[in-house]
Amino acid sequence: MPVSVVTGAAGFLGSHLSDRLLSEGHSVIGIDNLLTGSVANIEHLAGNERFKFIKQDVTEFLYIPGEVHNVFHFASPASPIDYLELPIQTLKVGALGTHKALGLAAAKGASFIIASTSECYGDPLVHPQTEDYWGNVNPIGPRGVYDEAKRFAEAMTMAYHRYHKVNTHIVRIFNTYGPRMRLKDGRVVPAFVSQALRGEPLTVFGQGQQTRSFCYVSDLIDGIFRLSQSSFHEPVNIGNPLEMTVKEFAEHIIKITGSASTLTYKPLPVDDPKQRRPDITRAKQILGWEPKVSLEEGLTKTIAYFKGRIEA
């Protein structure tokens, strides 16, 4: 039975990844310090003999007895609210946490996969974004703590691959949504859905002409699992290439929720990317992957989840 370690296991993506690995017959050791993760995301795994949870900061030495076959490093604050409030912790988990997780993989002879991000491309000058684009990032801006932490994590991952011969994989994750996102995590889907369900105005930054591409969580996790089983080592974009403006997306949320909400506009945050859409040619060719869940279907499931959270 493969043994997989998942850092950030109590987070939005880490918990869904743990579910997928368990469904594939893996034994999962989840690690999380619960800084932004929640036990509620993994409470359904309580009593599962193939799931073990360790509360620990992954920037500290990781001791896991016995065999480990895969290390998935998903620990990190991942929303603008989190990494602006936790800049040092964000940098530390990207640097020290990645170093510790890679060290565990090297010691165990395990494969390693790092959850990187489309933020590596910054405010891109190339559209859509391909993996060979080096990005347009402001290293000293407020978003730089997240962008540069992930860019450093990618560099560290490739160094371990080249120097220590670790079987590494890098997934660049584009905007993803679904159940288990936090209501107030600052990202556009929970913000718009919770405001619409409460009948509040939806907060649009700038004129709402910046674009985003939204991938449902089950599609993303499928791409990540396929990548983890591959022999490919360079970055792979996983996301949905369906692009829309933030304003269009807000209007779509109002329509699908049947809300009477209106739109309200606030100034654009510093270094907010103007365009975001993945080129997924590499994922199609190497992994045979592309998203399957429509925006309508994904949003219906997500809205039902948030409705339950708001009413609870």
Image (tube, rainbow, N blue to C red):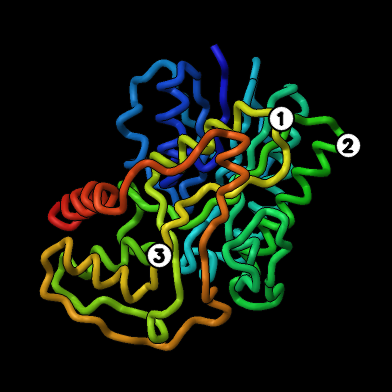
x and y percentages locating residue 191 in the rendered image: 31, 67
User: What's the residue at 42%, 38% (across, down)?
Assistant: 15
- Would residue 289 appear left or right of 262 to someone viewing this image? right
Q: Earlier in the sequence, mark 1 or mark 2?
A: 1
Q: Alpha-carbon distance for marks 3 and 1?
A: 31 Å
Q: Residues within 10 Å of mark 1 (few under 14, many from 20)?
A: many
The alpha-carbon separation of the residues under discs 2 and 3 comes to 37 Å
Residue labelled with disc 2: 163
Residue type at numbered disc 1: Ala
Q: Residues within 10 Å of mark 2 (few under 14, many from 20)?
A: few
Q: Is residue 59 left or right of residue 43?
A: right
Residue at image x 73%, y 62%?
134
Q: Percent from the top left, x then y, of residue 167?
A: 74, 30
- With respect to residue 105, does 180 lie above or below? below
State the image quarter where residue 168 is shown: top right
Amino acid identity at mark 3: Arg
> Relative to 214, does residue 159 appear above or below in the rendering?
above
Where disc 3 sits, the SS reads loop
Report which residue position mark 3 lands on: 187
- Res. 88 in view: no
**Viewer-proximal residue among 249 and 156:** 249
Q: Nearer the viewer, residue 283 or 170?
A: 283
**Distance from Cα at disc 1 to Cα at disc 2:** 13 Å
Residue occupying the far right of the picture: 163
Residue 105 - label = 1
Q: Earlier in the sequence, mark 3 or mark 1?
A: 1
Who's the residue at 21% across and 54% down the image? 303
> What quarter of the picture does the N terminus occupy?
top right
